[in-house]
Image: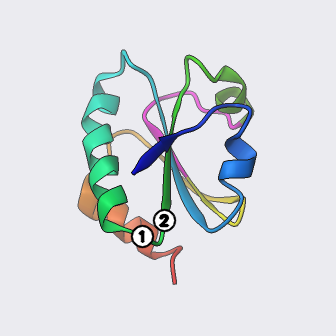
Amino acid sequence: MVDAINDQNFDEETSNGVALIDFWATWCGPCKMQSPVIEQLSEERQDVNFYKMDVDQNQDTAKNLGIMAIPTLIIKKDGNIVDRITGYTPKEKLDQILDQYTD
């Protein structure tokens, strides 16, 4: 399951374990392609927490992280950003990237 988060709970929700945050917007075509990939991975992987954040409704976090293009996927481990991926990413590649940060 992919949980929606916002500016207020971003730090708290993504502070433990491995978290993938999908920064997206309703008008973004590539975001609409990325969403089902994230949903599928969230069902297959119990070792990663999956979140999505609408950049139009949560501009502070996107601004603070310097997100200039979407979709942008941020991977955090124990609250620290360990990777950033911009643009559509296929499931297999994203799975390999996540493997680097999980035990």
83 with respect to 100 (left or right):
right
Marks 2 and 1, how far apart at CA: 6 Å
Work out whether 88 lies above or below 55.
Answer: below
Instruction: Tell me the residue at 71%/39% (across/down).
Output: 9
Q: Position of residue 99 (x, y in %)?
A: 43, 75
Residue at point 31%, 60% (across, down): 43
* Element under disc 1: loop
Three-letter amino acid code at the position of disc 1 = Gln
Q: What stretch is highlighted in magenta?
A: 65-74
Q: Position of residue 36 (x, y in %)?
A: 26, 43
What residue sits 53% from the left and 73% below the top? 101
The quadrant in which residue 31 appears is: top left
Residue 101 painted magenta: no
x and y, in percent, of residue 8 in the image: 74, 33
Does the segment drawn in magenta span residue 66?
Answer: yes
Callout 2, which amino acid? Val
- Secondary structure, magenta segment, majority class: loop
Disc 2 element: loop
Q: Which residue, given by chain and number where applicable, does mark 2 sit on?
A: 48
Asked whether, in this view, residue 66 is left or right of residue 44, the answer is right
Looking at the image, residue 14 lies above or below residue 44: above
Q: Do the residues labelled 2 and 1 touch (CB within 8 Å)?
A: yes
Q: Position of residue 86 (x, y in %)?
A: 45, 41
- Give the crowd class for mark 2: few <14, some 14-19, many >=20 residues within 10 Å: many
Q: Which residue is drawn at 63% across and 24% down?
A: 58
Task: Check disc 1 and report the residue beneath it.
Answer: 46
Q: Write down the quadrant of residue 35 in the picture.
A: top left
Residue 81, relative to residue 86: is it above or below? below
Closest to the observer, 81 or 9:
9
Which residue occupies the extreme bottom position in the image? 103
Residue 60, label in figure: none
